[in-house]
Amino acid sequence: MKTAMEPSVDLTLRHARCSTQIKELAIQSVLIASSLVAVLTTVGIVASLAFEAFRFFEKIPLTDFLFGLEWSPQTAIREDQVGSSGAFGVIPLLTGTLLISFIAMLVATPLGLLSAVYLAEYARPNTRAVIKPLLELLAGIPTVVYGFFAALVIAPIIRAGGSGVGFEISSESALAAGLVMGIMLVPFISSLSDDVINAVPQSLRDASLGMGATPAETITKVVLPAATPGIIGSLLLAVSRAIGETMIVVMAAGLAAKLSLNPLEAVTTITVQIVTLLTGDQEFDSAKTLAAFAIALYLFVLTLGLNVVALKIVDKYKKQYD
Amino acid sequence: MTDFAQKAYTLETSPSLKRRHAKEARFKWYGRIAITIALSFLVFMFGAIFLRGMGAFQQTKISIEVTFSEQVIDPNGVRDPEILALANYKPILTAALTRTFPNVIERRDKGRLYKLLSSGAVYEMGKLVSDNPDLIGTSQTIWLPASSEVDLFMKGKIDTSLPEELRRIKNQDITYIKALKQSGQIKKKFNTAFFTNGDSREPEMAGILGAALGSFFSLLVCFMIAFPLGILTAVYLEEYAHKSKLTDLIEININNLAAVPSIVFGLLGLSIFLGVFHIPRSTPLVGGMVLALMTLPTIIIASRASLRSVPQSVRDAAFGLGASKTQATFHHVVPLAMPGMLTGTILGMAQALGETAPLLMIGMVAFIVDIPQGVTDAATSLPVQIFLWADSPEKGFVERTSAAIIVLLAFLILMNLLAVFLRRKLEKRW
């Protein structure tokens, strides 16, 4: 039944297929292009931070920055000003940041882990369905609200408590910022650890319970040890979060860059210094503004390192039980 | 053997078992206590903010009879609304106050009397007259905002037991206020200015409309960029791409971007968007762009999960009927995954709404009185406004900060509820 129409049908078909292919290709390239935005963002972050930081290190030697024990970025505005050469040692900022993060983790780790264990192993499904979203509400509250609360409510309470027992506590203290940040991190740790604990195979629990262990013994001696790598990963992610947190410390931790481990004193952090150096009017090229990019690069490398390690650990752990 | 028999306990009497059971009960309580601590902190924080903030939804107002004299307001009779808005209303107000308190004669006493009203009262009058020029030449009884100190006094937030020198409200002011109270000329009324004004140096005139619109425009820009980009990326990674070095690179990037401190995104905006592309500083446009890059990972991760939950049979059916890859994906898979994608996007937007630190970096932290009209007007955002007010030494701003937080939390809860609603209503379980 071959007719004269056949070749022309074939042609239109081929034509249609060709244009469809072009369309498919075009759409695919649009898709790839939009996926590359994420890559471009990372490149943009690294490039912009590295570029400005490089200019900073042309003025200030790298070793002074990394190992300097003093931070006072007040460079001279006029040539004839005295005593304002500026010191750009990152160590006081790092200790302040780590001190506050440490206090925060001291609060968040027990609260987060114990809640996670309770929710994963003991809570009835109904209780879980109510408690879990409530805990996660803590993670959804903007950090500026925590900062306001820390500065307005927690800091005065700590101060009053301190003067009650004869301690002189400044109105901005590492303790207030750390405590509030700790509460903020609880849902972060609890939901990550919850996933990790749930991923421990039921057979391990059954074996332990079958040997006559109580549920608590099963959890502390079997489930948690099995989940340890994953839990460490989630704690590292929380630390990285604490180090990069900005608003709570800006509002509650203070500006003085002191090399101190006393949680009752005001300390400053990397993020606080970035904010103070870059808000307000100043020329773009001064060592002061460039310093902000240098410490931001430092912060970025620090958190990125923690994240990469944490994600690696969690990933490896997940594969263990797949 | 006899030894063993002596130590044989039943299940009920074994001390070690008792100890183990007690430990079990204790362990359970540790978990309960941890959850209780975290949740009571939440209640404590909400409670403290609500108690402080509710007051700001009311504002003390004073009613006085003013004469809108043409001579003072518009001596040339042009009735230009701009002139009317900016005319000198101060003598009208002082005259009205003097008439209300005819016994106050001393210059110093008069000075204190005039300070009962907010310094923003003249702007309120200007607005009133320029909106309704017929008022000129008439006498009206109008309610004008009281000053912040009077407002705090009326709300019981000033400790009158302190010696007079230590208070902003003097005994003399209190006698004036008492007199006004007796004649019913001072009252707490609903604070409309809080919802219709921009920022102000005077707490009683400060409102959140400017900041709220700034947030709205930023989120609009953020949505327009992040939603399509996020969905297209998710579609590429889930539907099109084969596992390759490129997709690995993209995935690692997305996971790491999700964990980069938000302030670093602000620095990216500062040096690239402002420094290289010269997008106007302090605008919702640049704010939205920065927020878009931040929310992108959230949207991508949620959209991928949603795409993954669409069963393979849908794709197979489409292919079986001769659909191309694009047709199968965009006509069938994406619409089915859309509710999940929208839910993820709303959650990402909620996160963006609460973000403060990156906006500080790109100059959205200025004192801006004007209410932004579009994405290229200078603006702040709600959380930045909270930060600015929290920093202010004026006592009257404490309750306004808390009130702004209440408004922000209300928006966040609304967005989250919307996400939950969408998930419940539209999402299919396969």
Image: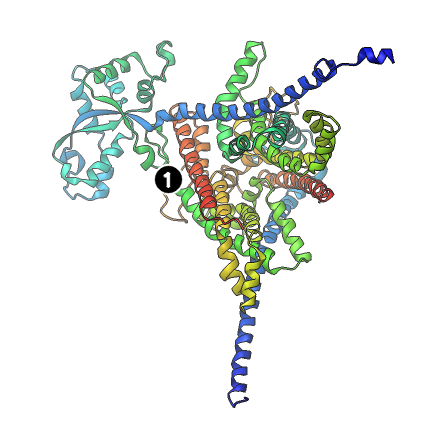
Q: Give the chain of mark 1.
A: B
Residue B363 in view, yes or no: no
Q: For this rendering, which residue is in front, A48 or A281?
A: A48
Q: Is residue A2 above or below residue B112?
A: below
Residue B318 image position (x, y, % from top left): 54, 64
Category of crowding for the residue at label 1, using alpha-carbon neighbours closer than 10 angstroms: few (below 14), some (14–19), many (at least 20): many
Quarter assignment of residue A92: top right
Q: Is residue B386 visible?
A: yes
How far across and down, in percent of the image, does residue A59 sit? 66, 41
> From this viewpoint, which residue is outermost toward the bottom?
A4
Please give the name of the residue rendered at 38% of the width and 10% of the height, measured from the top-left corner.
Answer: B162
- Using residue A149 as the reference point, say whether residue B154 is left or right of it: left
Specify whether B390 is left or right of A111: left
Of A32 and B205, nearer the camera is A32
What is the tally of numbered marks visible in this picture? 1
Residue B6 pos. (x, y %) = 81, 10
Rendering coords of residue A80 (x, y %)? 58, 33
Residue named by callout 1: B210
Q: Secondary structure at mark 1?
A: helix
Q: Look at the image and tell me in which quarter the N terminus of chain B lies.
A: top right
Kind of residue sitting beneath label 1: Gly
Above or below residue B85? Residue B165 is above
Question: Taking B360 as reference, is A101 above or below it?
Answer: above
Give whichever of B428, A235 is nearer the camera. Answer: B428
